[in-house]
Image (spheres, rainbow, N blue to C red):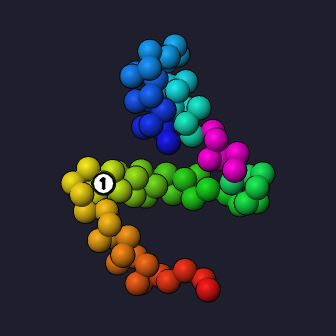
Amino acid sequence: MVLGSLGRGRAGGAVGTPFSRSCSGTARPWIGHFFFEKNRPATFTYPLWSLRGDLRMYVLMLTGRMAPEVDRALQAYPPHA
């Protein structure tokens, strides 16, 4: 969401600094974690692992390898029935 907010602000000519746009993109999911899911995002406990995972996901999406990774994850961790 943060990268999307930064890109949307740049493409749409929105006002605000990249920092304020990234805070806006990060605040919405955190609000969901705290108020709706009643949990704490792992980003607070493991910020570098969170960044590593985000960057890996972006590379997989940009190179067109995300679908096989999702299939692999679903086999390893099947959803609750």
Magenta-highlighted residues: 27-32
User: Which corner quadrant holds the C terminus?
Assistant: bottom right
Residue furthest to the left: 63
Q: Residue sitting at 35 percent across and 56 percent down?
A: 57
Whether 72 is drawn above or below 31: the answer is: below
Rendering coords of residue 61 (x, y %): 30, 54
Q: Residue sitting at 50 percent across and 42 percent down?
A: 1
Q: 48 or 5: which is nearer to us?
A: 5
Q: Residue sitting at 57 percent across and 32 percent down?
A: 23
Is 55 positioned to the left or the right of 25 in the image? left
Q: Is residue 21 visible?
A: yes
Magenta: main secondary structure equals helix
Q: Residue sitting at 76 percent across and 60 percent down?
A: 38
Residue that numbered label 1 is attached to: 61
Is 71 positioned to the left or the right of 60 in the image? right
Q: Is residue 45 visible?
A: no
Whether 57 is drawn above or below 67: the answer is: above
Whether 53 is drawn above or below 9: the answer is: below
Tell me the SS state at disc 1: helix
Q: 21 or 47: which is nearer to us?
A: 21
Rendering coords of residue 75 (x, y %): 40, 84
Q: Amino acid at mark 1?
A: Met
